[in-house]
Image (spheres, rainbow, N blue to C red):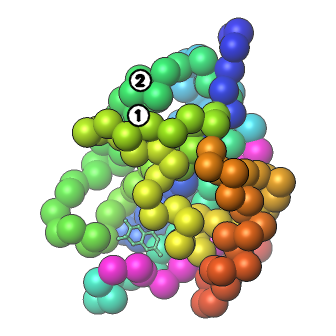
Amino acid sequence: MTDTLRCFIGLGSNLDDPRQQVLRALDELAALDDCRLGLRSSLYRSDPVGPQDQPDFINAVAELHTSLDAETLLDRLQMIEQQHRRVRERHWGPRTLDLDLLLYGNASIATERLKVPHPYMSERSFVLWPLAEIAPELRLPDGTTLEGLLALCPMGTLERLPL
Ligand code: ROI
């Protein structure tokens, strides 16, 4: 694999054994063609953002090195979501697996299908804290430091789980 970009993927689940959903998804990311899985964060338990009448989430972030273009990578992520029988029912409702492309190298992308950096990542503790575990030095394409974002986004009730 030549010319790879360093990407970050956010994983989340709150249905059907969320911990196993996320662990399985990490294995599936590792098995993707034209991709190499780098560091992965611990698993975190998080209170639901959005409707509160749904189970807690398990979240994690993984580093992925890839030679795929962003849209093709998104296709692969959505294929993995489908394998987890992801059904989109309620907006911001419970889900068996969510895979978000958080960062794609240093690119800023805004198409109908894909927005990178992920529009909400800067305000979500369940993204920023796992990300900081594996890439504390990170900067967003606009130069914002992860360290600066963390200062504005306390861990709150987010809980890092033992391995
Ligand atoms: N809340 C948490 N804590 N973790 C998630 O991954 C998550 N994903 C979502 C919504 C429903 C917005 N809430 C979440 O898509």
* Numbered tag placed on residue 88 in the rendering: none
Magenta residue span:
39-50
Residue 57 shown left or right of residue 132 in the figure: left
Horizontal side, residue 145 vs residue 124: left or right: right
Residue 104 appears left or right of 74 = right
Q: How far apart are marks 1 and 2 (CA)?
A: 5 Å
Please name the residue that numbered disc 2 is placed on.
Answer: 72
Residue at x 37%, y 40% (from the top left corner): 110
Q: Which residue lies furthest to the right in this view?
A: 137
Q: Position of residue 26 (x, y in %)?
A: 59, 45
Whether residue 138 appears in magenta in the rendering, the answer is no
Helix, strand or loop at disc 2?
helix
- The residue nearer to you, when weighing 56 against 50, is 50
Amino acid type, label 2: Thr
In the image, residue 140 lies at what x, y percent?
A: 65, 50
| Residue at 74% in and 38% down | 38
Q: Position of residue 80 (x, y in %)?
A: 40, 38
Occupied quadrant, residue 51: bottom left
Q: Is residue 24 above or below residue 19?
A: above
Quadrant containing ligand 1 reads bottom left
